[in-house]
């Protein structure tokens, strides 16, 4: 696996995000800073340089308004994961679910989607490299530790990636509020990629055309759509429920 081209360190903050990063053997840690009343356990960062600081000092290291819970960890980005790594990982799996994001760029949404992906045992989250946010403390905080366990795969061409996944046994299901059938009306394949577009414009035309079929979530007509991270969680839940994986 090749190294990530982006080598600039960044601060991960928030208790759960920091602990997950500390316990991830693939994450390169540089130093940790915390305030005395933080719940961080020293056994989690043996051999990592640390410094006890004031809350004011910690605030100054991080974006304005960051909810750090008294701890921040300076890290290097994870190694790049490629689509080939995911197809190889899932080749012999009986059941596998992947999320593919089209035009979803908000780091808080992507972080929340990673959290749901971890909760429902997804194998990866894929998104286009163009306009995709890099690893940041805000993304890691929203993911609540899931950035360390769910591969975030950036690809140069979504349609080509869809074709690669199809060749490796995946069915591509696009979530579209204008689809004719509900997710509960269709038999969900054991190897599924759910494609989610942005809340404003949804999937791009070419992305939608390359789905095997589109489905929608059964929601009240009081709302036109759901936040994309909520839609991802419901789709992942339905995959696990339909295949009796709970």
Image: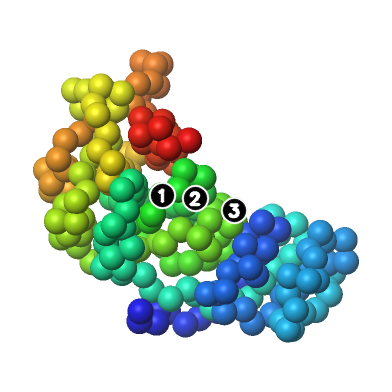
Residue 136 position, x and y percent, is 52, 65
Which mark, residue 122?
1
Work out whether residue 14 or residue 223 is closer to the camera in this orientation and state it. Answer: 14
Q: Secondary structure at mark 3?
A: loop
Task: Judge left or right: residue 19 versus residue 50.
Answer: left
* Outermost residue toward the right in this view: 36
The image's colouring method is rainbow
Viewer-nearest of discs 1 and 3:
1
Q: Is residue 156 visible?
A: yes
In which quarter of the view is residue 156 placed?
bottom left
How would you rate the neighbour count of disc 3 (Cα within 10 Å): few for under 14, some for 14-19, many for 20 or more?
Answer: many
| 96 w.r.t. 232: above or below | below
Task: Judge left or right: residue 32 versus residue 207.
Answer: right
| 7 w.r.t. 87: above or below | below
In which quarter of the view is residue 105 placed?
bottom left
Which mark, residue 118?
2
Q: Residue at x 80, y 65 (%)?
A: 41
Residue 185 position, x and y percent, is 25, 22
Q: Secondary structure at mark 2?
A: helix
Mark 2 and mark 1: Cα distance apart in space: 6 Å
Mark closer to the chain start, 1 or 3: 1
Residue 85 position, x and y percent, is 31, 68
| 109 w.r.t. 1: above or below | above
Residue 222 position, x and y percent, is 40, 16
How would you rate the neighbour count of disc 2 (Cα within 10 Å): few for under 14, some for 14-19, many for 20 or more?
Answer: many
Q: Is residue 201 visible?
A: no
Mark 1 and mark 3: Cα distance apart in space: 16 Å
Mark closer to the chain start, 2 or 3: 2
Work out whether residue 205 or residue 39 is closer to the camera in this orientation and state it. Answer: 39
Mark 2 and mark 3: Cα distance apart in space: 10 Å
Viewer-nearest of discs 2 and 3:
2
Residue labelled with disc 3: 144
């Amino acid at each position: 696996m090749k190294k990530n081209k982006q080598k600039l360190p960044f601060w991960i903050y928030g208790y759960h995000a920091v602990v997950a990063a500390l316990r991830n053997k693939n994450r390169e840690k540089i130093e940790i800073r915390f305030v005395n009343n933080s719940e961080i356990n020293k056994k989690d960062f043996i051999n990592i340089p640390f410094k006890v600081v004031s809350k004011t000092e910690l605030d100054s290291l991080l974006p304005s308004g960051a909810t750090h819970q008294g701890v921040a960890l300076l890290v290097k980005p994870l190694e790049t994961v490629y689509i080939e790594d995911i197809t190889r990982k899932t080749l012999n799996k009986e059941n596998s679910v992947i999320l593919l994001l089209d035009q979803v760029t908000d780091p808080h949404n992507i972080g929340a989607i990673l959290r749901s992906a971890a909760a429902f045992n997804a194998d990866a989250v894929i998104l286009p490299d163009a306009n995709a946010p890099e690893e940041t403390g805000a993304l890691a905080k929203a993911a609540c530790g899931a950035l360390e366990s769910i591969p975030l795969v950036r690809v140069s061409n979504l349609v080509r990636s869809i074709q690669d996944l199809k060749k490796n046994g995946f069915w591509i299901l696009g979530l579209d509020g204008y689809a004719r059938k509900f997710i509960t009306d269709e038999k969900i394949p054991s190897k599924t990629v759910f494609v989610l577009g942005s809340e404003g414009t949804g999937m791009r035309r070419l992305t939608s055309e390359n789905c095997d079929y589109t489905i929608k979530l059964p929601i009240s007509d009081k709302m036109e759509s759901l936040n994309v991270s909520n839609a991802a969680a419901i789709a992942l839940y339905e995959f696990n429920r339909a295949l009796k994986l709970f």
